[in-house]
Image (spheres, grey):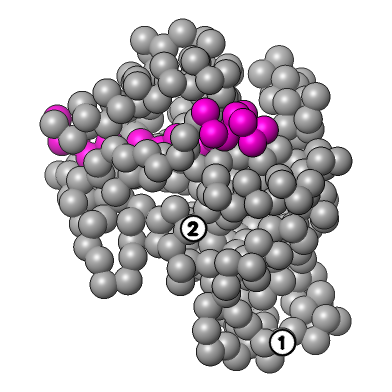
Amino acid sequence: MKRLDEKLARIRTGAYRRRDFIIADAKDPDMGPSLAACGPNRAPDGTWTRYRTRAEFLDQIRGIVRQDVLDVMLASLSNLEVLIGEGVFRDSAIVPAIRANDTTDIWMVRGGRYNQRPSRPFRSASLARAREIGIDLGLYSVTFNNDLDADVASLEAFAAFRADAASAGFRYFLEVFNPNVETGIAPDMVGHYVNDCIVRCLAGVAAADRPQFLKIAYNGPKALEELAGFDPGLVVGVLGGGAGTTRDTFELLAQAERFGARVALFGRKINLAESPLAIVALMREVASGDVRPAEAVRAYHGTLQREGITPARKLDDDLAITERVLRDAATD
């Protein structure tokens, strides 16, 4: 069994310990925002003149897999095909997972406006090809917009995916974004709207076809506790959202664990960090309860100083919580 499966088994049976918290790196930006989202190619002094090439992006993934702190590495099928072909995951406890669909709300390409309309279902990746390569886990994404036609289309595509996954012997985890367009729903009800949509869309799904875990936006303690406490068999995870400050990264992780999440899947918060390896190592310590968020920020800056890397923000600025949803329940 991979580390992920062992942790999921303990979580589902009520034997969860903080060191069982699951951490995933979402290295799949080429499936959405694309080239620019692979991140700037920074010099140690923080300056940059171009974005990373695919080769440089793959090399970052190799380094994080070698570090062996994470539980899941999420990437595009094309990139995982290269890495698996090289044997990168051969002796690793980290599970490779593909983004199994790429709905239009993540098409945030430069100059485009696809994401300004209600999400439409779309899939690039072939599950059959993924299985041939040796991948049996993927992320499937749905966005509900309180739009009957758009949401029915998304649910019909989700049903077709589940049938395809069952035929291919493919497991998945389910990402449910907050609405990507104006819905008429009051801001303080969005988290509850998403919770209801999740429970409703899975109620008719047999255990064999259900997701391994969820990936949702953190909509505050009340909404997270409500969903996490509803069904112990439904493992809830949070997505990272924007890059934010380093304090935002660690604060989100700590609050998510405290209010019932058992998984964190962070993309930009890792990918755009000055030192992805250092931030991943400290994420594990924060999730395990060994280090508090503010301490982790200071430790991160200490690592940057030792490595001769200029931080993007001064320490005091990086200690600030900039995401409003995190401020009220700050841990320290």
Residue 133 is covered by the magenta coloring: yes
Number of callouts in the render? 2
Identified at 32% across, 71% down, the residue is: 110
Identified at 36% across, 53% down, the residue is: 106
Residue range (magenta): 128-148
Identified at 33% across, 44% down, the residue is: 103
Residue under pointer 2: 29
- How busy is the neighbourhood of tag 2: few (under 14 within 10 Å), some, or many (20 plus)? many
Q: Position of residue 146 (x, y in %)?
A: 19, 36
Reply above or below: 298 against 42. above
Instruction: Give the residue type at disc 2.
Output: Pro
Nearer to the camera, 220 or 63: 63
Nearer to the camera, 164 or 15: 164
Nearer to the camera, 264 or 174: 174
Instruction: Give the residue type at disc 1.
Output: Pro
Residue under pointer 1: 44
Reply above or below: 69 against 112. above
Identified at 67% across, 33% down, the residue is: 134
Q: Position of residue 66 (x, y in %)?
A: 82, 54
First in sequence: mark 1 or mark 2? 2
Question: Quick one: SS at disc 2?
Answer: helix
Quarter of the figure that contains the C terminus: bottom right
Question: Quick one: SS at disc 1?
Answer: loop
Q: CA distance from mark 1 to mark 2?
A: 23 Å
Residue 120 is covered by the magenta coloring: no
Q: Position of residue 101 (x, y in %)?
A: 41, 39
Residue 271 visible in the displayed image = yes
Reply above or below: 15 against 45. above
> Hey, which quadrant is residue 130 in on the image?
top right
Residue 70 visible in the displayed image = no
